[in-house]
Amino acid sequence: MSVTVRVPMNIALVKYWGKRDEKLILPLNDSISLTVDELCAETSVELVKQDDHTVSINGKEVDLESNKRYRTVFNEALRFQRKRAHEKENGTSNNNIGLKFKVTSTTNFPVAAGLASSAAGFAAISMAIQILIGLDETQANKVARIGSGSACRSMFGGLVQWKSGIKDDGTDCFAIKVNEGWNTLRCLIFVFDGEEKKVGSTEGMRRSSQTSDLLKYRIEHLVDKRIAKIAEAYEKRDFDEFAKVIMSDSNQFHAICLDTSPPIRYLSDASWKLIEVVEKFNENGKRKAAYTFDAGPNACVILEDQNVQDFLRFATSQIVVPIDDLNKISTSITQTEQPIAVA
Ligand code: DP6
């Protein structure tokens, strides 16, 4: 049997940066994200008779020796399956013994360019496996998380919070849907660079947790307040406040990267130009647009539907490069579309 799912990426509004357990991928802080419906990983998973697990992404075979997370994900999923078989049938049978996972995935956005592609990718693998071998929601969420932390947020639509928890075994660490229904929100993705990032998130956050005082300050004093403000502004449809918190957290995340030793620079000149454009667009009156950047130069601009055209006109007049050359992907954030099984 083969299961195919389509799972969207998510964009963090209050970022996850730092792990309290690298193996279990337990974060140092809660984070909150929006699920972006049009940027997806479409992934098929089968259990087949072959020598080893295989993963193909956008037509390229992944080397599972240098990308160890895949094997961790598969082993954990199979462990859950064995556990269930044991509980149900007293360990007598497990039909899938000796079978290996065959994963085929395609994404409609650049992989590893700071666009949370690993989030959609691992969430899709985990959801397909969930259906294929019958995992419960908590197990599937863990399988996604140990693939890539931010992936556990892509298992839901809408506004999603990933709770860091405090337990060593991670049983209180999972993502939950906080809210849905701000249907007029839109997200414009500006792809300035589709190349793989120089310092991956895993290495970057390891470095920052070890060396940045600002990271500690943010976690101790700011993250929880920001998450509460985001949830409240979202609930009240208060875009001005929503945008303020999103931009503060994005800027502080990149400040933490600079406060890291050796420092990490993810933003490019093009990213900075975009920041200036958004700040200028917001200058008089209430904020109408919010930028946020993950571990890469590409921008995500969040707006309400009625302001998209105005913003694009304004950005085109401000940015020297014609806007079409920026390889803009216009996309929407949905509160209704969950990750879906397509076959
Ligand atoms: C900046 O989830 O890619 O996008 O857990 O090591 O795989 P690993 O990291 P990953 O980190 C995402 C970091 C971020 C912020 C966020 O998405 O919250």
Image (cartoon, helix red, strand yellow):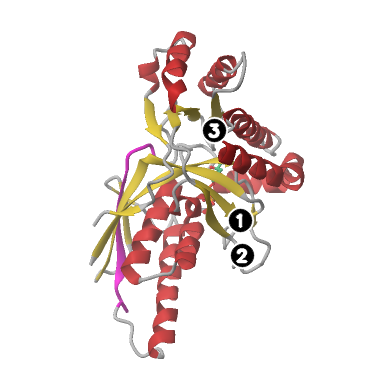
Location of mark 3 (residue)? 293
Q: Position of residue 95 (x, y in %)?
A: 29, 81
Quote the CA–CA distance across marks 1 and 2.
8 Å
Quote the CA–CA distance across marks 3 and 1.
21 Å
Which mark identifies residue 219?
none
- Sooner in the amino-acid sequence: mark 3 or mark 1: 1
Residue 68 seen anywhere in this rendered image of the structure: no
Closer to the camera, 205 or 158?
158
Res 187 → quadrant: top left
Q: Amino acid at mark 2?
A: Asp
Which mark identifies residue 163?
1
Residue 233 seen anywhere in this rendered image of the structure: yes
* Residue at disc 1, secondary structure: strand
- Sooner in the amino-acid sequence: mark 3 or mark 2: 2
Q: Amino acid at mark 1?
A: Lys
Q: Position of residue 3 (x, y in %)?
A: 27, 61
- Front disc: 3 or 2: 2
Asked whether disc 1 touches disc 2, contact meaning CB atoms under 8 Å apart, the reply is yes
Quarter of the image with the N terminus in it: bottom left
Q: Amino acid at mark 3?
A: Phe
- Magenta segment boundaries in residue numbering: 96-110
Location of mark 2 (residue)? 172
